[in-house]
Image (cartoon, rainbow, N blue to C red):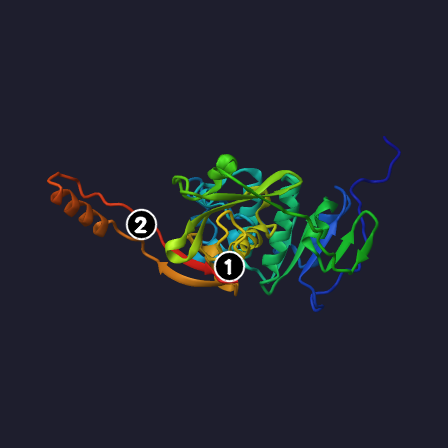
Amino acid sequence: MFNAESGANFSIDADLPGEDEDWRIGVIVGPSGSGKTSLGRLVFGDAEVYTEPEWPGDAPIIDAIAPGKDFNDVTASLAAVGLGDVPAWLRPYAVLSNGEKFRATLARVIADAPGRVVIDEFTSVVDRQIAKFGALAFQKAWRRTSGKAVLLTPHYDVLEWVEPDWTFDTATRTLDRRRLQRPTFDLQVWETDWRYWPAFEPHHYLKIGKMIAATNYVGTVDGELVVHLAVSPAFQNNAYRASRLVVMPEWQGAGVGMRFLNHVCAMNLRGETRFGRPHGTLFHTSHPGLCAALRRDKRWIQKSASLFGVNKGKSASTLLKSAHRAGATAVGVGYGGHMRAVQGFKYVG
Protein backbone atom coordinates (compact mmCIF):
# COMPACT_ATOMS: atom_id res chain seq x y z
CA MET A 1 0.00 0.00 0.00
CA PHE A 2 2.85 2.39 0.92
CA ASN A 3 5.32 0.98 -1.62
CA ALA A 4 7.78 0.30 1.23
CA GLU A 5 9.83 -2.66 2.37
CA SER A 6 8.51 -4.83 5.18
CA GLY A 7 8.59 -3.06 8.56
CA ALA A 8 9.06 -6.40 10.32
CA ASN A 9 12.66 -6.75 9.17
CA PHE A 10 15.50 -5.07 11.07
CA SER A 11 19.23 -5.71 11.14
CA ILE A 12 22.23 -4.10 12.79
CA ASP A 13 25.87 -5.17 12.87
CA ALA A 14 27.89 -4.36 16.00
CA ASP A 15 31.29 -5.58 17.12
CA LEU A 16 30.98 -5.21 20.91
CA PRO A 17 33.61 -6.06 23.57
CA GLY A 18 33.40 -9.66 24.77
CA GLU A 19 32.76 -10.96 28.26
CA ASP A 20 36.36 -12.10 28.60
CA GLU A 21 37.66 -8.57 28.09
CA ASP A 22 38.49 -6.19 30.94
CA TRP A 23 35.52 -3.84 31.28
CA ARG A 24 32.87 -3.12 33.87
CA ILE A 25 30.32 -0.78 32.30
CA GLY A 26 29.25 -0.50 28.67
CA VAL A 27 26.63 1.79 27.18
CA ILE A 28 24.49 1.34 24.08
CA VAL A 29 23.08 4.74 23.16
CA GLY A 30 20.91 5.95 20.31
CA PRO A 31 17.47 7.23 19.34
CA SER A 32 14.30 5.21 19.77
CA GLY A 33 13.89 2.44 17.21
CA SER A 34 17.60 2.25 16.42
CA GLY A 35 18.16 -1.24 17.87
CA LYS A 36 19.33 -0.62 21.45
CA THR A 37 17.00 -3.14 23.08
CA SER A 38 17.65 -5.77 20.41
CA LEU A 39 21.40 -5.46 20.91
CA GLY A 40 21.04 -5.42 24.68
CA ARG A 41 19.22 -8.75 24.63
CA LEU A 42 22.08 -10.26 22.64
CA VAL A 43 24.95 -9.08 24.84
CA PHE A 44 24.44 -11.60 27.65
CA GLY A 45 21.17 -13.17 26.57
CA ASP A 46 17.56 -12.39 27.45
CA ALA A 47 17.93 -13.78 30.95
CA GLU A 48 20.29 -10.99 32.00
CA VAL A 49 18.01 -8.11 30.99
CA TYR A 50 16.93 -6.61 34.30
CA THR A 51 13.25 -7.00 35.13
CA GLU A 52 12.33 -5.15 38.29
CA PRO A 53 10.53 -7.31 40.87
CA GLU A 54 7.17 -6.04 42.07
CA TRP A 55 7.34 -3.63 44.99
CA PRO A 56 5.05 -4.26 47.98
CA GLY A 57 2.26 -1.71 48.27
CA ASP A 58 2.64 -0.77 51.93
CA ALA A 59 6.21 -1.60 53.01
CA PRO A 60 8.85 1.14 53.17
CA ILE A 61 11.51 0.75 50.50
CA ILE A 62 14.21 0.13 53.11
CA ASP A 63 12.38 -3.11 54.00
CA ALA A 64 11.54 -4.04 50.41
CA ILE A 65 14.83 -3.62 48.53
CA ALA A 66 16.59 -6.74 49.84
CA PRO A 67 14.65 -8.32 52.74
CA GLY A 68 17.11 -11.14 53.20
CA LYS A 69 20.22 -8.96 53.34
CA ASP A 70 21.97 -7.17 56.16
CA PHE A 71 20.53 -3.77 57.13
CA ASN A 72 23.88 -2.07 56.59
CA ASP A 73 24.11 -3.51 53.06
CA VAL A 74 20.66 -2.15 52.22
CA THR A 75 21.33 1.35 53.54
CA ALA A 76 24.73 1.33 51.84
CA SER A 77 23.11 0.52 48.50
CA LEU A 78 20.60 3.36 48.96
CA ALA A 79 23.28 5.86 49.88
CA ALA A 80 25.56 4.60 47.10
CA VAL A 81 23.06 5.52 44.37
CA GLY A 82 22.39 8.95 45.86
CA LEU A 83 19.18 8.14 47.73
CA GLY A 84 20.46 9.23 51.12
CA ASP A 85 17.24 10.99 52.08
CA VAL A 86 16.14 9.05 55.19
CA PRO A 87 12.48 10.20 55.07
CA ALA A 88 12.29 8.68 51.56
CA TRP A 89 13.57 5.34 52.92
CA LEU A 90 10.45 5.09 55.07
CA ARG A 91 7.95 5.55 52.23
CA PRO A 92 6.45 2.82 50.03
CA TYR A 93 7.71 2.75 46.45
CA ALA A 94 4.36 3.82 45.00
CA VAL A 95 4.44 7.26 46.66
CA LEU A 96 8.04 8.13 45.72
CA SER A 97 8.84 10.73 43.10
CA ASN A 98 10.11 9.57 39.70
CA GLY A 99 13.64 10.49 40.70
CA GLU A 100 13.39 8.54 43.96
CA LYS A 101 11.91 5.53 42.14
CA PHE A 102 14.78 5.64 39.66
CA ARG A 103 17.36 5.62 42.45
CA ALA A 104 15.48 2.95 44.44
CA THR A 105 15.58 0.67 41.40
CA LEU A 106 19.32 1.24 41.03
CA ALA A 107 19.77 0.51 44.74
CA ARG A 108 17.98 -2.79 44.21
CA VAL A 109 20.41 -3.67 41.42
CA ILE A 110 23.40 -2.73 43.59
CA ALA A 111 22.06 -4.76 46.53
CA ASP A 112 21.53 -7.81 44.30
CA ALA A 113 24.96 -7.29 42.65
CA PRO A 114 24.41 -9.71 39.72
CA GLY A 115 27.46 -10.84 37.79
CA ARG A 116 25.93 -9.64 34.50
CA VAL A 117 23.05 -7.26 33.94
CA VAL A 118 21.48 -5.22 31.14
CA ILE A 119 19.39 -2.19 32.18
CA ASP A 120 17.05 -0.83 29.53
CA GLU A 121 15.71 2.74 29.38
CA PHE A 122 18.44 3.91 31.76
CA THR A 123 17.57 7.45 33.03
CA SER A 124 14.69 7.75 30.54
CA VAL A 125 11.93 8.85 32.92
CA VAL A 126 13.70 11.30 35.24
CA ASP A 127 14.72 14.93 35.33
CA ARG A 128 18.00 15.39 33.47
CA GLN A 129 19.95 16.64 36.48
CA ILE A 130 18.82 13.68 38.58
CA ALA A 131 19.70 11.48 35.59
CA LYS A 132 23.28 12.78 35.51
CA PHE A 133 24.00 12.49 39.23
CA GLY A 134 22.07 9.23 39.48
CA ALA A 135 24.23 7.87 36.66
CA LEU A 136 27.37 9.09 38.43
CA ALA A 137 26.35 7.51 41.74
CA PHE A 138 25.40 4.22 40.07
CA GLN A 139 28.67 3.87 38.18
CA LYS A 140 30.73 4.51 41.33
CA ALA A 141 28.69 1.94 43.28
CA TRP A 142 28.71 -0.60 40.45
CA ARG A 143 32.50 -0.46 40.12
CA ARG A 144 32.73 -1.64 43.72
CA THR A 145 31.03 -4.88 42.66
CA SER A 146 32.61 -7.53 40.45
CA GLY A 147 29.94 -7.58 37.74
CA LYS A 148 29.56 -6.30 34.20
CA ALA A 149 26.69 -3.96 33.33
CA VAL A 150 25.37 -2.76 29.97
CA LEU A 151 23.15 0.31 30.06
CA LEU A 152 20.71 1.11 27.24
CA THR A 153 19.69 4.75 26.92
CA PRO A 154 18.46 7.26 24.34
CA HIS A 155 20.13 10.10 26.27
CA TYR A 156 23.60 11.27 25.32
CA ASP A 157 23.80 13.73 28.23
CA VAL A 158 24.56 10.99 30.79
CA LEU A 159 27.50 9.42 28.96
CA GLU A 160 30.23 11.47 30.64
CA TRP A 161 28.63 10.92 34.05
CA VAL A 162 28.43 7.14 33.58
CA GLU A 163 32.11 7.10 32.52
CA PRO A 164 31.59 3.88 30.50
CA ASP A 165 34.49 1.68 29.45
CA TRP A 166 32.94 1.48 25.98
CA THR A 167 30.05 3.11 24.13
CA PHE A 168 28.20 1.86 21.07
CA ASP A 169 26.10 4.44 19.21
CA THR A 170 23.28 2.78 17.27
CA ALA A 171 22.71 5.97 15.26
CA THR A 172 26.22 6.01 13.78
CA ARG A 173 26.93 2.26 14.23
CA THR A 174 30.28 3.12 15.87
CA LEU A 175 32.04 1.74 18.92
CA ASP A 176 34.11 4.04 21.16
CA ARG A 177 36.44 2.23 23.55
CA ARG A 178 37.60 5.37 25.37
CA ARG A 179 36.59 5.69 29.01
CA LEU A 180 34.92 9.08 29.20
CA GLN A 181 35.65 11.49 32.04
CA ARG A 182 32.86 13.17 33.95
CA PRO A 183 32.51 16.98 33.91
CA THR A 184 33.39 19.17 36.87
CA PHE A 185 31.42 21.93 38.57
CA ASP A 186 32.20 24.62 41.14
CA LEU A 187 30.51 24.62 44.55
CA GLN A 188 30.50 28.02 46.25
CA VAL A 189 30.39 28.08 50.07
CA TRP A 190 28.57 30.89 51.86
CA GLU A 191 28.41 31.82 55.56
CA THR A 192 24.86 32.76 56.54
CA ASP A 193 22.13 32.22 59.15
CA TRP A 194 19.01 30.01 59.38
CA ARG A 195 17.17 31.75 56.53
CA TYR A 196 17.78 28.89 54.05
CA TRP A 197 17.10 26.04 56.50
CA PRO A 198 13.37 25.74 55.62
CA ALA A 199 14.37 24.57 52.12
CA PHE A 200 16.61 21.83 53.55
CA GLU A 201 14.66 20.81 56.67
CA PRO A 202 12.18 18.43 54.95
CA HIS A 203 15.12 16.26 53.88
CA HIS A 204 16.72 15.99 57.35
CA TYR A 205 15.92 12.87 59.33
CA LEU A 206 15.34 14.69 62.65
CA LYS A 207 12.70 17.25 63.52
CA ILE A 208 14.43 19.30 66.22
CA GLY A 209 15.02 22.94 67.07
CA LYS A 210 17.72 25.22 65.80
CA MET A 211 21.19 25.04 67.33
CA ILE A 212 22.10 27.81 69.77
CA ALA A 213 24.67 30.40 68.60
CA ALA A 214 25.05 28.60 65.29
CA THR A 215 26.77 29.82 62.16
CA ASN A 216 25.18 28.35 59.04
CA TYR A 217 26.90 27.46 55.79
CA VAL A 218 25.30 26.71 52.45
CA GLY A 219 26.86 25.45 49.23
CA THR A 220 25.48 26.61 45.89
CA VAL A 221 26.08 25.85 42.22
CA ASP A 222 25.21 28.71 39.88
CA GLY A 223 23.01 30.16 42.62
CA GLU A 224 21.10 26.92 43.27
CA LEU A 225 20.96 25.64 46.86
CA VAL A 226 22.85 22.34 47.13
CA VAL A 227 24.02 21.60 50.69
CA HIS A 228 23.65 22.95 54.25
CA LEU A 229 25.56 22.71 57.55
CA ALA A 230 25.23 24.46 60.93
CA VAL A 231 28.15 24.92 63.35
CA SER A 232 27.92 25.92 67.03
CA PRO A 233 30.71 26.56 69.55
CA ALA A 234 31.45 23.72 71.97
CA PHE A 235 34.36 25.42 73.69
CA GLN A 236 33.82 23.46 76.91
CA ASN A 237 35.20 20.54 74.84
CA ASN A 238 37.75 22.69 72.96
CA ALA A 239 35.77 22.06 69.81
CA TYR A 240 33.04 23.19 67.47
CA ARG A 241 29.90 21.11 66.94
CA ALA A 242 28.51 20.59 63.44
CA SER A 243 25.03 19.34 62.61
CA ARG A 244 22.12 19.65 60.15
CA LEU A 245 24.14 18.39 57.17
CA VAL A 246 21.67 18.06 54.29
CA VAL A 247 22.25 17.60 50.55
CA MET A 248 19.30 18.42 48.30
CA PRO A 249 17.86 15.23 46.72
CA GLU A 250 18.63 16.25 43.14
CA TRP A 251 22.31 16.69 44.07
CA GLN A 252 22.72 13.49 46.06
CA GLY A 253 25.28 11.25 44.43
CA ALA A 254 27.35 14.17 43.12
CA GLY A 255 29.93 13.75 45.90
CA VAL A 256 29.41 17.17 47.51
CA GLY A 257 28.34 16.17 51.05
CA MET A 258 31.63 14.96 52.52
CA ARG A 259 33.71 17.52 50.61
CA PHE A 260 31.54 20.35 51.89
CA LEU A 261 31.63 19.04 55.47
CA ASN A 262 35.42 18.64 55.36
CA HIS A 263 35.85 22.12 53.87
CA VAL A 264 33.90 23.80 56.68
CA CYS A 265 35.60 21.71 59.37
CA ALA A 266 39.01 22.61 57.93
CA MET A 267 38.08 26.30 58.26
CA ASN A 268 37.15 25.66 61.90
CA LEU A 269 40.49 23.97 62.50
CA ARG A 270 42.29 27.03 61.09
CA GLY A 271 40.19 29.37 63.22
CA GLU A 272 38.47 30.93 60.21
CA THR A 273 35.23 31.51 62.12
CA ARG A 274 33.53 34.50 63.68
CA PHE A 275 35.03 33.39 67.02
CA GLY A 276 38.57 33.25 65.64
CA ARG A 277 39.41 30.16 67.69
CA PRO A 278 41.03 27.13 65.98
CA HIS A 279 39.45 23.86 67.09
CA GLY A 280 38.48 20.48 65.73
CA THR A 281 34.83 19.77 65.00
CA LEU A 282 32.52 17.24 66.64
CA PHE A 283 29.85 15.63 64.49
CA HIS A 284 27.15 13.15 65.54
CA THR A 285 24.92 11.25 63.18
CA SER A 286 22.59 8.26 62.97
CA HIS A 287 22.90 7.96 59.19
CA PRO A 288 24.63 4.60 58.52
CA GLY A 289 26.03 5.68 55.16
CA LEU A 290 27.52 8.86 56.58
CA CYS A 291 28.97 6.94 59.55
CA ALA A 292 30.72 4.59 57.14
CA ALA A 293 32.07 7.51 55.09
CA LEU A 294 33.43 9.24 58.19
CA ARG A 295 35.16 6.05 59.32
CA ARG A 296 36.84 5.73 55.91
CA ASP A 297 38.12 9.31 55.96
CA LYS A 298 41.48 9.63 57.74
CA ARG A 299 40.69 13.23 58.70
CA TRP A 300 38.09 11.94 61.16
CA ILE A 301 38.39 9.83 64.31
CA GLN A 302 35.46 8.08 65.97
CA LYS A 303 34.84 9.27 69.52
CA SER A 304 31.66 7.49 70.58
CA ALA A 305 28.98 5.01 69.58
CA SER A 306 25.65 4.62 71.34
CA LEU A 307 24.12 1.91 69.21
CA PHE A 308 20.99 1.25 71.28
CA GLY A 309 19.90 4.75 72.24
CA VAL A 310 19.94 6.46 75.63
CA ASN A 311 17.14 6.57 78.17
CA LYS A 312 16.12 9.58 80.23
CA GLY A 313 16.39 7.93 83.65
CA LYS A 314 19.41 9.85 84.92
CA SER A 315 18.01 13.19 83.78
CA ALA A 316 14.59 12.44 85.26
CA SER A 317 16.13 11.48 88.61
CA THR A 318 18.12 14.71 88.73
CA LEU A 319 15.03 16.80 87.99
CA LEU A 320 13.06 15.08 90.77
CA LYS A 321 15.84 15.66 93.33
CA SER A 322 16.09 19.32 92.38
CA ALA A 323 12.33 19.73 92.68
CA HIS A 324 12.24 18.07 96.11
CA ARG A 325 15.04 20.31 97.40
CA ALA A 326 13.03 23.32 96.29
CA GLY A 327 9.93 21.98 98.00
CA ALA A 328 8.09 21.53 94.71
CA THR A 329 6.58 18.59 92.93
CA ALA A 330 7.68 17.48 89.49
CA VAL A 331 7.13 14.72 86.98
CA GLY A 332 10.36 12.91 86.19
CA VAL A 333 10.24 13.07 82.41
CA GLY A 334 13.89 13.86 81.79
CA TYR A 335 15.68 15.37 78.84
CA GLY A 336 18.10 14.22 76.21
CA GLY A 337 17.02 10.63 75.98
CA HIS A 338 16.20 8.97 72.68
CA MET A 339 15.90 5.54 71.17
CA ARG A 340 18.13 5.91 68.13
CA ALA A 341 21.70 4.88 67.50
CA VAL A 342 24.13 7.80 67.47
CA GLN A 343 27.80 7.73 66.53
CA GLY A 344 30.20 10.57 67.28
CA PHE A 345 33.23 11.69 65.30
CA LYS A 346 35.84 14.47 65.46
CA TYR A 347 37.55 16.22 62.57
CA VAL A 348 41.28 16.35 63.30
CA GLY A 349 42.54 17.26 59.80
Residue at the extreme top: 1
Q: Is residue 48 left or right of residue 337?
A: right
Give the SS element for disc 1: helix
Query: What residue is at 48 percent from the left and 50 percent from the top?
Result: 65
For residue 339, the mark is: 2
Query: What residue is at 16 percent from the left and 39 percent from the top?
Result: 330
Residue 70 visible from this viewpoint: no
Q: Nearer the viewer, residue 244 or 169?
A: 244
Q: Is residue 301 left or right of residue 147?
A: left
Q: Position of residue 133 (x, y in %)?
A: 63, 48
Q: Is residue 190 left or right of residue 85?
A: right
Q: Is residue 307 above or below residue 207?
A: below
Q: Amino acid at mark 2?
A: Met
For residue 235, the mark is: none
Q: Is residue 241 left or right of residue 25?
A: left
Disc 1: which residue: 293
